[in-house]
Image (cartoon, rainbow, N blue to C red):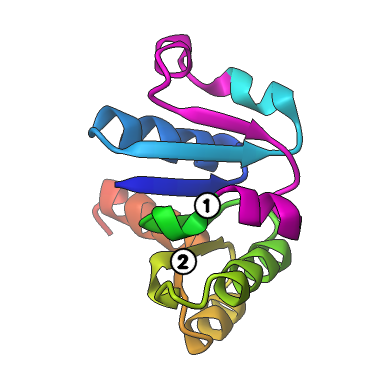
């Protein structure tokens, strides 16, 4: 499975690492080349994770990523609004893909609900972390 991940922060890099270790092919995009330093060298050096320096919100870059060949797109920039905008661009530029294959990572309920109403899958990371903490506390 080929997965395009926009945003190489802690979340994007961790997703890329995990999917690579599970045998999938992540393509990780970020404006800042230094962001890729969080990745394990052996995964990048052996082409198990492809890194692309560029603006994931740029239509030309989105087209160059050959999204029709990917199975999933994840927007994980750390900016909820930007994640939604990028998801919309992917959806518009590649109408042949199912919008449910576009995953938007957000920090708030209101935007998660909005993006889901637009047909995207949304992950509210604040909610997920809270649930995990409560499970750890056994509350």
Residue on which disc 2 sits: 102
Q: Where is residue 72 in the image (x, y as percent from the top left)?
A: 40, 57
Which image quarter: residue 48?
A: top left
Question: Quick check: is 41 in the magenta stretch?
Answer: yes
The secondary structure type at the circle numbered 1 is loop
Q: How many marks?
A: 2
Closer to the camera in the image, 68 or 107 = 68
The residue lying at 72 percent from left, 63 percent from top is 82
The residue lying at 39 percent from left, 74 percent from top is 100
Measured along the vertical axis of the image, is residue 78 above or below residue 20?
Answer: below
Which image quarter: residue 107?
A: bottom right
Question: Quick check: is 48 in the magenta stretch?
Answer: yes
The residue lying at 63 percent from left, 33 percent from top is 52
Magenta region, residue range? 38-65
Q: Give the foreground label among 2 and 1.
A: 1
Q: Where is residue 38 in the image (x, y as percent from the top left)?
A: 56, 22
Q: Label for residue 15?
A: none
Look at the image and tell me in which quarter the C terminus lies.
bottom left
The residue lying at 36 percent from left, 37 percent from top is 25
């Amino acid at each position: 499975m080929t997965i395009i991940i926009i945003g190489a922060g802690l979340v994007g890099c961790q997703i890329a690492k995990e999917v690579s270790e599970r045998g999938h092919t992540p393509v990780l995009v970020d404006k800042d080349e230094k962001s890729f330093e969080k990745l394990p060298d052996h995964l990048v050096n052996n082409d198990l994770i492809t890194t692309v320096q560029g603006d994931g919100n740029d239509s030309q870059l989105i087209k160059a990523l050959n999204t029709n060949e990917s199975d999933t797109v994840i927007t994980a920039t750390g900016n909820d609004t930007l994640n939604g905008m990028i998801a919309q661009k992917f959806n518009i530029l590649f109408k042949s893909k199912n919008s449910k294959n576009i995953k938007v990572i957000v920090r708030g309920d209101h935007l998660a609900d909005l993006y889901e109403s637009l047909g995207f899958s949304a992950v509210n990371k604040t909610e997920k972390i809270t649930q995990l903490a409560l499970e750890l506390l056994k509350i």
